[in-house]
Image (spheres, grey):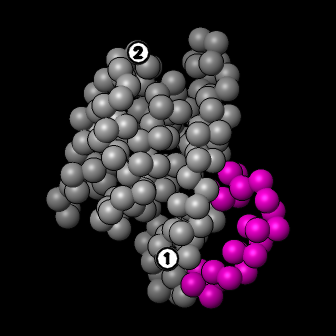
């Protein structure tokens, strides 16, 4: 599904953090979704393309549905963890100064709005997977504070266990 979503867009029409069009992100995502070799850092090529230190570029909101489609499927845990961490950064992000100057001040809001479509993916992840990162995303996308607190209490033992094991964060 993620590849279909990836192919849906003409990425050349979006600005990337490297200053070029985002067309090359198609291959970057394909490589990431194809399960990179064990020694390779998942998604290292996304760095400085969708965001830099939480400052977003035009391609970022377009990447959110691709990430959601990937998370809805089977992924190696390190790839899943990496995509969740990228998504967490994007939902908390804001437009890079160059994007504001180009008339795109609302990239953070656009990422947040698109990420809300994956609400139950994050809850599933909080219960069965990368608990801390999923809860971080939910802090931004969940409008129902009571439900979020209920799930937070329910997954607290899992989160504490993951922290004790020193589960690597992405």
* Residue at the image position 38 percent from the left and 51 percent from the top: 70
Which residue appears farthest toward the left when viewing the image?
Answer: 37
Give residue 168's position: percent from left, percent from top.
43, 72
Compared to residue 37, the image places residue 108 above or below, namely above
Q: Is residue 17 left or right of residue 164?
A: left
* Residue at the image position 64 percent from the left and 41 percent from the top: 112
3D distance between C-alphas at marks 2 and 1: 37 Å
* Residue at the image position 27 percent from the left and 50 percent from the top: 33
- Element carrying mark 1: helix
Residue 24, located in which quarter of the rendered image? top left
Sort mark 1 into few (<14), some (14-19) or many (20+) by Cα contacts within 10 Å.
few
Q: Which residue has dot 1 on it?
A: 128
Q: Is residue 116 left or right of residue 153?
A: left
Compared to residue 115, the image places residue 145 above or below, namely below
Depth check: give the residue in front, 20 or 9: 9
Q: Which residues are magenta?
A: 137-160
* Residue 13: mark: 2
User: Is any atom of residue 101 visible in this view?
Assistant: no
Give residue 118's position: percent from left, percent from top.
56, 52
Compared to residue 26, the image places residue 101 above or below, namely above
N-term-proximal mark, 2 vs 1: 2
Is residue 97 in the magenta section? no
Asked whether the beta carbons under mark 2 and mark 1 sit within 8 Å of each other, the answer is: no
Which residue appears farthest toward the top when viewing the image?
Answer: 102
Give residue 97's position: percent from left, percent from top.
62, 22
- Element carrying mark 2: helix
* Residue at the image position 63 percent from the left and 65 percent from the top: 135
Give residue 30's position: percent from left, percent from top.
25, 42
């Amino acid at each position: 599904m993620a590849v279909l979503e990836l192919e849906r867009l003409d990425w050349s029409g979006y600005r990337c953090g490297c200053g070029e069009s985002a067309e090359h992100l198609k291959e970057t995502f394909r490589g990431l979704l194809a399960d990179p070799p064990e020694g390779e850092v998942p998604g290292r090529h996304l760095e400085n393309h969708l965001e830099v230190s939480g400052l977003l570029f035009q391609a970022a909101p377009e990447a959110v549905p691709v990430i959601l489609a990937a998370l809805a499927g089977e992924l190696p845990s390190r790839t899943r963890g990496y995509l969740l961490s990228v998504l967490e950064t994007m939902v908390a992000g804001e437009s890079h100064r160059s994007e504001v100057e180009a008339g795109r001040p609302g990239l953070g809001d656009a990422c947040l709005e698109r990420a809300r479509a994956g609400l139950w993916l994050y809850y599933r992840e909080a219960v069965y997977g990368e608990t801390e990162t999923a809860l971080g995303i939910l802090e931004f996308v969940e409008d129902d504070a009571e439900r979020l607190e209920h799930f937070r209490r329910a997954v607290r033992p899992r989160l504490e266990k993951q922290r004790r094991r020193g589960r690597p964060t992405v």
